[in-house]
Image (cartoon, rainbow, N blue to C red):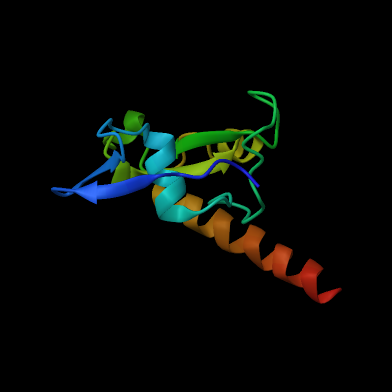
Amino acid sequence: MGIHLDLMRIAGRWRRSNGELPSDREVIRRRDGDHCWLCGGAIQFEARPNSNAAPSIEHLVPLSRGGSSALSNKVLCHVSCNRDLRNHPLEQKELMRAVRQQKRRKRWRGR
């Protein structure tokens, strides 16, 4: 299942065991796991780029609204979920997330 991330924290920064800095996607995946921030569904890292199940990086506070490119402002999402989030404010994104994850829980319970 997926690739093994051989990352370790050195001097406050994530690094690969060979000393190279990993990509933002690798660090976020290590931090948050393999699930979409919005819907909670599994992200298919082997999916075709830009397909709906493929991973993409979403800025929680959009750059157009003064957000930063810091890792703390980035999460993994499906491409389709990222499109839905657009450049909405964080409060609206959190509401969208709560609604989607509640629907997902109801489906698991068979309701």
Asked whether residue 34 appears in the rendered view, the answer is yes
Q: Residue at x 61, y 33 (%)?
A: 79
Q: Is residue 8 left or right of residue 74?
A: left
What residue is shown at x 50% (from left), y 43% (from top)? 76
- The residue at the far right in this view is 110
- In the rendered image, the vertical position of residue 98 relative to residue 72, given as above or below: below
Residue 59 lies, in percent from the top left, at 40, 38
Left or right, 37 with reference to 49: left
Q: To which quarter of the image does residue 73 belong? A: top left
When the figure is inspected, residue 98 is found, relative to residue 21, above or below; the finding is below
Return the residue nearer the eye: 61 or 69. Answer: 69
Image height of 12 relative to 21, above or below: below
- 94 horizontally vs 100: left or right: left
At a point 43% along the width and 50% down the height, the residue shown is: 30
Picture coordinates of residue 62, whole percent (x, y): 37, 36
The number of numbered badges drawn on the structure is 0
